[in-house]
Image (tube, grey):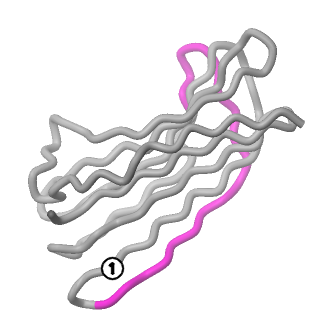
Amino acid sequence: MTRHRQLMSGMAVAAIGLTAAGAAVSTGSAHSGVEPVRCEIQASTRAGMTSLTGMVKADAVHTGIYRFDVKSSGRSGSSNISQSGEFEAGPGEDAEVGNVMLSSPGAIFDARLELEVRGKTIVCDKRFGAI
């Protein structure tokens, strides 16, 4: 089984500094044949809430399963959130595979999105939060 992983280095991004118009993104990809499948973790902040969203993009129609995990830690404690399920993505039809809304000023969020597509694993890791 061919396995391709791309891990983005943990980079601290001030959650307060993210704007609704801008987003921080982490990506990973794997090629099944000639049609790549990519994952992204997008972050945005609006009205004091940080939103982390898992996305799947594909150049051809693909189905698979996902697991989206978000861990947070800050002054008010810590939390672990996991979401999983099936998805279908294709040209012009990106799949949103998880969404977490968080309100923890000064917290650090570690997000991980894992995709299983045609026996291949695609992983995106990203750290968001206070500096």
Residue annotated with mark 1: 73
Q: In screen coordinates, is 65 left or right of 74?
A: right
Image quarter of residue 33: top right
- Horizontally, residue 26 falls left or right of residue 91, namely left
Of the 4 image quadrants, the one containing the N terminus is top right
Q: Main secondary structure of the magenta part?
A: strand
Identity of the residue furthest to the top in this view: 34
Q: How many marks?
A: 1
Q: Nearer the viewer, residue 58 or 92?
A: 58
Viewer-nearest residue: 111 or 104: 111
63 up-or-down from 125: above or below:
above
Q: Quadrant of the C terminus?
A: bottom left
Residue at image point 42% right, 49% down: 53
Image coords of residue 3 (percent x, y): 77, 37
Specify few, some or many for label 1: CA neighbours under 10 Å numbering under 14, 14-19, or 20 or more. Answer: some
Nearest to the observer: residue 76 or residue 5? 5
Residue appearing at x 71%, y 13% in the figure: 35
Q: Residue at x 47, y 66 (%)?
A: 70
Q: Is residue 101 left or right of residue 61?
A: left
Residue at the location (9% across, 51% down)?
A: 17
Q: Is 79 included in the stretch rendered in magenta?
A: yes
Residue 24: horizontal and vertical position, in percent? 28, 41
The image quarter containing residue 79 is: bottom left
Q: Give the left or right position of residue 109, taking residue 59 as reference.
A: left
Residue 68: x and y in percent read 57, 57
Q: Which residues are magenta?
A: 77-94
* Element type where label 1 sits in the image: strand
Q: Residue 128 at x, y = what percent? A: 29, 57
Q: Nearer the viewer, residue 82 or 7?
A: 7
Above or below — where is 60 with respect to 97?
above
Q: Is residue 5 magenta?
A: no
Tag 1: amino acid:
Ser
